Amino acid sequence: MKRAWICIGVVAACHGGSRKEPATTGSAGSGNVAAAVAEGKAQPPPSPLADSFATLPLSIVSAEPAAVAGLEAQVMGDEHFFEAACWKAISSKIDGYYEVDLAKKPDQAVFHSSIVHGGATLDELRRCRKADKDRKESKNPKIVVVRDVGFFPIVVVDIGNGWMLVLDGDLEPLLAAAESVAKELPTTTRNGLANAVGMKPEPGWHAIGLDVTSELFGVPSIGARADFTPTPVGEPLKGPVTLTAYFASADDAKKALAAVGQRRDDAFDDLPMRTLETARKVGEVGVEGATVVYRGPLPKELADQEGLFAGFGRPIQQR
């Protein structure tokens, strides 16, 4: 995966991305929120984006919204690989652009993946490309090679339900990854991102559609999300965040939080427990319905744990 790191010690996923440094901040909890946390009764409302994200291939395991202007810079480039007027018509149909992680990605130093939602079609992309008789094409009708030369070749895959996957990097691994995703069989299993997706298609959240707690705490989760106020690329971490881990039931949420606070006899020792203690000193941690939520700042002593708790997400087991 990309640098979508998991602050398991706070039982939540923290923000990260492939093309920018972590950006955080959000709104701290009010007195009413604190009371709800203490009672364990509050339940976060479902996202209006959930049904759409539920249809994504299961190979897409995390998502974070980005500005559509970034997509335009990616696919147009200095050489304008699409006819400008034609691209303008296509971009007007886009209602969401998200950087994503694939469960399995090519082993390459440079590889970016994103998804686009809206009414644009693969045929429109084909028609909008500038003519190039030597351009390498895919035989798969679900795949369009936008460009096959230069520093970042680009491949687009129709993944259905109004979604397209955009891949850039080295061409041969891109085509292999595109073929793999294009061949994924339809499934009735909802993508786990539907459990954790943010409330709007604008930047300000990062969701992971994986079980981020089973490996370390023995209690399965069904996704995690960080909510924050975006900051410019390269600026240091600021202000409070809201970190949420989602569970199948309130009992699972309570068990997971209790497990974090227990001393261990493995390589992690008392680190999760100490991390939780720090989180409680600087913010609020508690059970809200079937979730565990942290609201507060992300100080250095919490942020420093990212490397120690990274990489423990695994596919969500359906019950």
Image (tube, grey):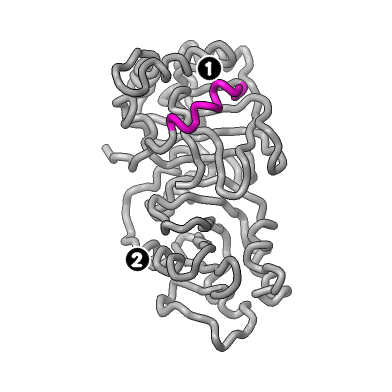
Residue drawn 53% across and 28% down? 243
Q: Which residue is mark 2?
A: 183
Q: Position of residue 207 (x, y in %)?
A: 50, 40
Magenta segment range?
A: 297-309
Q: Which residue is mark 1?
A: 279
Quadrant location of the C terminus in the rendered image: top left
Q: Amino acid at mark 1?
A: Ala
Is there any visible trace of residue 55 in the rendered image? no
Q: Is residue 253 left or right of residue 77?
A: left
Crowding at dot 1, Cα within 10 Å, few <14 / some 14-19 / many 20+, comes out as: many
**18 or 246, which is in the foreground?**
18
Q: Is residue 94 left or right of residue 197?
A: right
Which label number is shown at residue 176?
none
Q: Amino acid at mark 2?
A: Lys
Is there any visible trace of residue 307 in the rendered image? yes
Q: Name the outermost residue toward the left.
A: 319
Separation (CA) of disc 2 from disc 1 = 43 Å
Residue drawn 63% across and 33% down? 24
Q: Is residue 69 magenta?
A: no
Q: Secondary structure at mark 1?
A: helix
